[in-house]
Amino acid sequence: MSNHALVPDVERCTAAPNARPTLEALPGRLSALGGLPIRRLLPRSQRRLVGPWCFLDAYGPLTFAAGKPMDVAPHPHIGLQTVSWLLAGQVLHHDSLGCAGRAEPGVLNLMTAGRGIAHSEETPPGSAGQLHGVQLWVALPEATRAGAPAFDQHRALPGAALDGGHVTVLMGQCAGLRSPARAFSPLVALEVALSASGTLVLPLDFEFEHAVLVLSGTCVLETRPLAGDALYYLGCGRRELRLTCAHEPARLLLLGGAPFDETILMWWNFVARSTDEIVAAREDWQSGSRFGDVAAYTGARLPAPAFVARPVPR
Ligand code: MN
């Protein structure tokens, strides 16, 4: 995904963890990525980070007869990982390393930008006419953020049946299962499927802060019904989460991580530490250096928006 909906301001993102459990609704902001309606759930002005998770877009469910609802032309990233997870449909990734990867239900696409990569994401030809998914960004810590770019695809993520449903470990670990997906700071991402009856007790890391998003269906957390259009921040200090279906089977995304102890600056598709870094990355993209070409994409790449130097709000 490309964050061209919300430029041009630089956003300063600092952890603000609640040490104790809380339940804070963060309504998504409706936007569009090309012609694709999206709901932006992170960053929000009320909360910019959950662990190292710094960006969350949800799109769909939508159906289409023809065309490419997802068509994000080549654009650059630095300092982050992109995590793509679909509930329906397909998204075809190409990048400047020459990697191709079709994300579809059950398949995790994980791109590590490090010091710089460019990619495109598009609905592939012959797609089934449905699209529903999320894209997340993980901020990379100082020690690894200038590392080599990489693309990984995981087709066999660990999962387990629990009373009341099923959990799939996208990143990190849960219930004794560990995802093979590469992470660079302590974090977790789970897809939880709730059966129509019963309560699922999800074990959590007490030290992590967490948030939950309903992807489909309806769900009650402890005694509170959760809406589908908000990310719910849960705070730290939880050992478990009690989840129940309200009316129909539900699927949830659970995110978490150790509170990220570095302040990051986000602008366009860059996660950096200074505006000088942002300006340098922008110039490298505009001049065609550093990031390379996404040769497999037919069409023009995304130009960077103008960078307007002004003080970064606290
Ligand atoms: Mn992207």
Image (tube, helix red, strand yellow):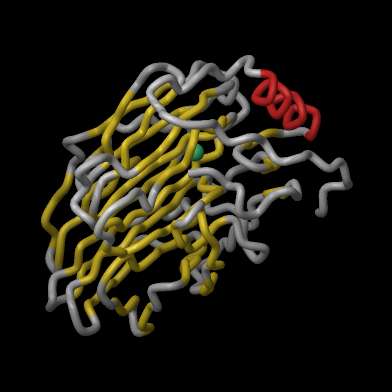
Q: Position of residue 286 (x, y in %)?
A: 68, 25
Q: Is residue 170 left or right of residue 194?
A: right
Q: Is residue 295 left or right of residue 118?
A: left
Depth check, front residue: 250 or 263: 250
Q: Position of residue 253 (x, y in %)?
A: 34, 58
Q: Is residue 277 left or right of residue 310?
A: left
Q: Position of residue 88 (x, y in %)?
A: 23, 55
Q: Is residue 98 left or right of residue 180?
A: right
Whether 96 is drawn above or below 161: the answer is above
Q: How many numbered marks have been drawn onto this rendered protein structure?
A: 0
Whether 138 is drawn above or below 245: the answer is above
Whether 98 is drawn above or below 212: the answer is above
Query: In the image, what residue occupies the spot 51% across and 47% down?
Result: 53
Q: Quadrant of residue 163?
A: bottom left
Query: In the image, what residue occupies the spot 35% across and 56% down?
Result: 204
Q: Position of residue 103 (x, y in %)?
A: 28, 40
Query: In the image, what residue occupies the spot 42% across and 17% down?
Result: 97
Query: In the image, what residue occupies the spot 82% across and 48% down?
Result: 312
Quadrant location, the C terminus: bottom right
